[in-house]
Image (cartoon, rainbow, N blue to C red):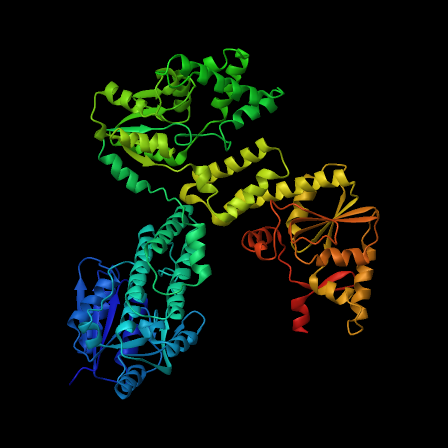
Amino acid sequence: METKISVIIPVYNTEEYLGNCLTSICTQTLEDLEIICINDASEDNSLNILNDFANKDKRIKVINFRLNKGAAVARNNGIKIAKGEFISFIDSDDYLETADFYEKLYNKAIQTNADITKGLYKNSFDNTVYENINNKIKENKNNFCSTYCSAIFRRSLLINNNITFPEISDMEDPVFAFEAALYANKIEVVEDLYIVITQRDNSLTKRQLRFQQLKDKIKGMEILLHLANSNSITPEVYSYVLGYWFVTIIQDVLNKNNSRIFSEYLFCKMAGIFRNFKFNVDINATFYNFFNKNLSEFYYFDKEELKKIIDTKDIISFDIFDTLLLRPFLAPSDVFKYMEQQYNIPNFALTRLVSEKKVRMVKTIRDRRIEDITIGEIYSKLDKNLRDKEMEIEAQILQCNEEILEIYNYALEQGKQIIITSDMYLPTNFLAQVLNDKGFKNFSKLYVSGEIGKCKATGNLYKFIIQDLNISPDKILHIGDNKISDIEKAKENSIEAFYYKNIFERFKISKINNYAFEYFDNYAIDKISSSSIIALSAINWINQNDKSNYWKDLGYNIGGPLALSVVTSIFTIAKQRNLSDIFFVARDGYMLKLVYDLIKPENAPKSHYIYASRRMKNLCINDNPIFSEITKNNYQKYAASIKLSRENIGIVDTCAGNFSAQTLIEKFFSAKSFLGIYIASTLNYKYNYINLSIKPHSNKAIGFSWDLIEFLFTSNEAPVEDMKNEKPEYRELLNDN
């Protein structure tokens, strides 16, 4: 009997579902089947179930792997030994819903001479049928990118074109399906045939994402890109196939694992993929620009790669500031501004900086061999008590960089000699004590430029170290955050260097963060406070390591600081403009009102949460008689119910395009004056308003960063259509009636 279809089933620990799967295949109306079951070193009763079925049905062949090799290897072994005219693949926890599944697919393939013929598949959890994928395939065969399990493939198609599953732990299925579609003469679809995909609590779709799995997902994307670029496919197919799988990968990272390190690695690698590939089709502009413009500089700190380098060296050198130790400020000079505030010393920060600059200039003129200075020299003409205060504050505020401490301890565990190398004016004994207090112990030597008189920035401190240690420079690895002094100058002296990017730059790398922090740093609160809050957010973010939670971090690092700065601005404006009441406009003013009420001083204007949507504005303002007088009357009653002093009202909203809220409020509320307070707005001089944005926005420019602002501050209410009995009536409620 000629075998029409070889069914290949990889099996691993599916004893609960395996019987149902095999029964659905063995009872097919098409009897000319070869059923190849590959037991991938199952640890449960799966092998016994396979053998029991094989004893009853001679079409079943059982192959047993002693070691687990993965589904891709199992399927590829099945392809090698398959004898059927067509080949089908089914996972051992899935099953065929209809007994004529293979018969109808086979007949369709023979009638149409199609290389691939497929049915539909549905989800066992909710019986969802994925018909849209079949519709896409009908439009273009190359859209066949994911549903290989519901299809049969002509064996000659696979053998002649050497099409197999890439041996990776994830993304092997879409790569196989996409390559098969590229070489297939045609793909036919048969409706009303279902394979049921089982959703298990412990299945891969439910389990937390493993790091190797993420790497394999990205490897799969690279293979897909290579296949796409090596073949002539339309931009539409390109966008659908690659966009579909790219979005799937991102969702996996966000849904299965909130780890920051996973997200960093994903975005870094994806940005590299899109930079390195030369696309021969037009990619969706948003899709491409998102990576190329926003993530092209994303930095991924690969600890495992660094540890491998450490293994090859005898001496490991660490920079101190922004590498081992972190200040809770964005700039070193912020320490002096902090002292100025703490000790109420007018102009201390400027005086301290000028003194340091003068000492450097004078000392280098006197002796060009001396490349750095000490803190004692800086304070030679200043109050010595302030020198001690500066060192005291440094000792208090400096924090351990947990991310680098792990690397530091690894080097110690491997028996490496550790040295500390810093361009710094602080004393060696002081730095040694701080390092020990923060957890960096057992280093052999500490090289500080101020006392040695030679700097990393010139490269001469590296020469001094090589001579002092009497060692070949190729046995040293230096780790630091400055591209010139820590990287270039080290390499000029034949020392291998590892670039550790400043965490504050990593934290603010995206345009979203840049916008939020630019706003935060320019408005609302004093510079030193904003510097400290941003820096502490970054330190918290980095020290969370892979325990970080995306949504919590978004609120802690961006939402909180941004809301604080906006509300503080409102307090200042209210005082300057003598505002009596503040209207926080629904829905975007929701979170800002909560923050306002939480921190407002005693004399702050009274706050109100006001409903004033575009929809109500259109109904209430327009004089056309077709608009309902009922809506106008309802809003009039609502406005009258708000208890106001009727003096000067501030209207707070996040974004004002056509000033719809201000238009409505000025029409129906009574007050001496109205002042709009907006984070961003298009310019319209008809209204009295203040634009808190860093720079003027056009209609077009309110887009990218704006989505984040709205997302952070808005309530979860639906849009309001009307006010009835002084209460909001939401759009969904109207639609339901």
Q: Residue at x 41, y 15 (%)?
A: 365
Q: What is the number of callouts on the image?
A: 0
Point 75% across, 38% down: residue = 576
Judged left or right of residue 708, residue 477 is: left
Give how far across and how far down residue 651 sits, in percent.
73, 50
**Relative to the observer, which residue lies in front, 314 or 717?**
314
Camera-side residue: 278 or 223? 278
Q: Position of residue 241 (x, y in %)?
A: 37, 67
Q: Is residue 736 left or right of residue 119?
A: right
Q: Is residue 267 above or below residue 230?
A: above
Instruction: Give the quadrant of the N terminus.
Output: bottom left
Q: Is residue 170 visible?
A: no
Quarter holding residue 337: top right
Identified at 42% across, 36% down, the residue is 502
Q: Is residue 600 visible?
A: yes
Task: Quadrant for residue 100, please give it.
Answer: bottom left
Q: Quadrant of the C terminus?
A: bottom right
